[in-house]
Image (cartoon, helix red, strand yellow):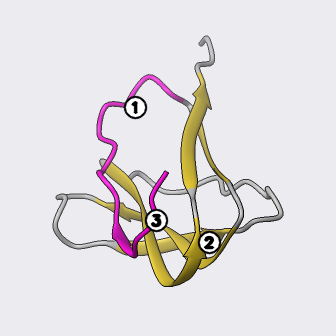
């Protein structure tokens, strides 16, 4: 988990995953934005994960994905990326 504001490491090796889902765990007061990028330097907000455990499923063909913690006040945050592979 993180306990400071800022962008986390980007995920870039998820090409085999057909459906990707971000979820957060922890007790915290902050905004956790899920962001996507085609080149790894220009980021677009895709959605926000919350303490309620609601997942965010990115749409679009992003090469890189990351979580970016903003408006951090307190607590510890863990953001997880999971996904499934689907056959043809």
Report, in whole angstroms, how far the alpha carbon at label 2 lies from the one at label 1: 20 Å
Look at the picture and state if 63 lies above or below 77: above
Left or right of 14, for residue 34: right
> In the rendered image, which residue does mark 2 sit on?
48
Name the residue nearer the viewer: 77 or 62.
77
Measuring 71% from the left and 68% from the top, which residue is drawn there?
50
In this rendering, the answer to whether 43 lies above or below 73 is above
Instruction: Farthest residue to the top: give it.
Output: 87
The residue carrying pointer 1 sits among few (fewer than 14), some (14 to 19) or many (20 or more) residues within 10 Å by Cα, namely some
Reading the image, the residue beneath label 1 is: 14
Image x and y of residue 48, in percent: 62, 72
Residue where numbered disc 3 is placed: 3
Q: Quadrant of residue 15?
A: top left
Tell me how far mark 3 sits from mark 1, CA to CA: 26 Å
Range covered by the magenta-colored residues: 1-17
Q: In the picture provided, is 7 more to the left or to the right than 77?
A: left
Left or right of 42 in this view: 84: right
Q: In the image, what residue occupies the spot 59% across and 34% down?
A: 82
Q: Position of residue 63 (x, y in %)?
A: 30, 48
Q: Nearer the viewer, residue 66 or 87?
A: 66
């Amino acid at each position: 988990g993180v306990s400071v504001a800022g962008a986390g490491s980007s995920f870039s090796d998820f090409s085999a995953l057909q459906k990707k889902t971000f979820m957060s765990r922890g007790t915290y007061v902050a905004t956790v934005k899920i962001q996507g990028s085609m080149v790894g330097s220009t980021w677009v907000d895709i959605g926000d994960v919350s303490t309620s455990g609601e997942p965010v499923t990115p749409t679009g063909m992003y090469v890189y994905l990351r979580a970016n913690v903003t408006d951090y006040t307190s607590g510890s945050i863990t953001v997880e990326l999971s996904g499934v592979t689907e056959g043809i």
